[in-house]
Amino acid sequence: MSGDPIRSAWHAVARAEDVASTGAPTPVTVLDTPLVAYRDGGGAAVMLPAACPHRGTDLGLGSVDGGCIRCPYHGWQFGASGRCTRIPSLGADLRIPDGAHAHAANARERDALLWVSLDPAADPSAIPSFPVAGAVAGMRLIAGEPLRWRTTPGRHVENILDLAHFPFVHPATFGCPEAEAVEPHEVTVAPGRFDCHVGVNTRNPDTPTGPLYPALGPIIRLGYHYTVQLPYRTTLEFSFPDGMRRALHEVATPTEDGECEIFWALLVDERLDSPDEDELAFANAVFAEDQPIIESQPGGVRIDRAAEVHVPADRLAVAYRRAMREWGVAADARV
Ligand code: FES
Ligand code: CO
């Protein structure tokens, strides 16, 4: 890997279901780079720079038909790999100039998401896996609507990793005073990733029909297992005292102006019969509690070891920053 590993990394930019071979193209922006996505005649997802090679018009205003995207200005059409296939003003003269072809970005469809790397040489085997229905035995998949937050993906990741905010930010959902003191925990590091097990006290969540776990008391202790794959892919698996499991899978993508889009899904133990809507509503309520807090922070996590002040409860954030430095992100970067 050369240069900035975040530019070379694979970023999730759209749900596969949102990209079509007819109708409107799907505009996406990653790392302040505007792109459009569509499907070619074979159904393969294509991502092109949003600026038309002719005069720079936004192809996101165009339309997709028969596996080609058509520019809204002069009707040039681009098909598989961004090849220009038609210039209407040429009439019967079909000689398309070399410069008319668009240069497709390095994009792949994987696990029901579209991924892109701004490095043309990036290896698709490095695309992080993401859960799809039926992929994990005994767990049902509930996909959430992508979220857009006015913060960087690094701030979002650190919020997921933050163990000390539950009593203060989440008293209405799962936080409780019994979680104020953070249990000691160790982080296990491997190149480009790390994980951590820690116990967390939590309120037995309320549901319209009473506590979520009627057999357990008002305060329960959950096992949290974090897995982070750099730069922005997180998994948080929860084990409940009665053996039930849930997991929150997320991947956050830097879009533009220091903002991010978050693709997420829940895996819920099949033995739990909670309706999908309730699971999504609970997760969205938790996100809504976090969002204004995180959006209030100054833009971007500084990964420099001297930045900000840390206490033992911040061990996961410290590990994240160190892992990013060791992975090759510049020490003065904000992520
Ligand atoms: Fe796109 Fe002319 S600007 S076809
Ligand atoms: Co939170």
Image (cartoon, helix red, strand yellow):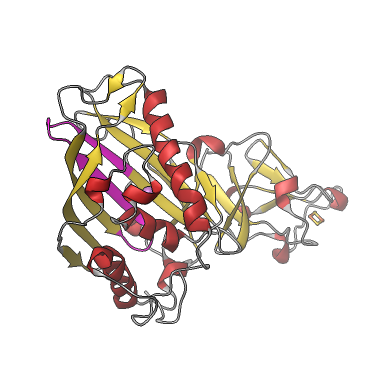
The furthest residue to the front: 177
Quarter of the view holding residue 313:
bottom left
Tell me if 263 is positioned left or right of 56 in this view.
Answer: left
Which residue is painted at 14% across and 63% down in the image?
Answer: 186
Where's residue 41, x and y in %? 58, 38
Residue stretch in magenta:
229-248
Tell me if 324 is positioned left or right of 41 in this view.
Answer: left
Which residue is painted at 59% across and 61% down in the image?
Answer: 256
Where's residue 296, x and y in %? 53, 60
Residue placed most toward the observer, 101 or 141: 141
Which residue is painted at 16% across and 53% down in the image?
Answer: 197
* Numbered label tally: 0
Where's residue 119, x and y in %? 47, 67
Quarter of the view holding residue 48:
bottom right
Which residue is painted at 27% across and 31% down in the image?
Answer: 268
Residue placed most toward the observer, 299 or 97: 299
Q: Quadrant of ligand 1?
A: bottom right
The furthest residue to the left: 242
The question of residue 8 being in magenta is answered with: no
Residue 80 appears anywhere in the view:
yes
Quarter of the view holding residue 150:
bottom right
The question of residue 230 being in magenta is answered with: yes
Where's residue 308, x and y in %? 39, 76
Tell me if 130 is positioned left or right of 240 in this view.
Answer: right
Residue 114 appears anywhere in the view:
no
Q: Quadrant of the C terminus?
A: bottom left
Tell me if 16 is positioned left or right of 110 in this view.
Answer: right
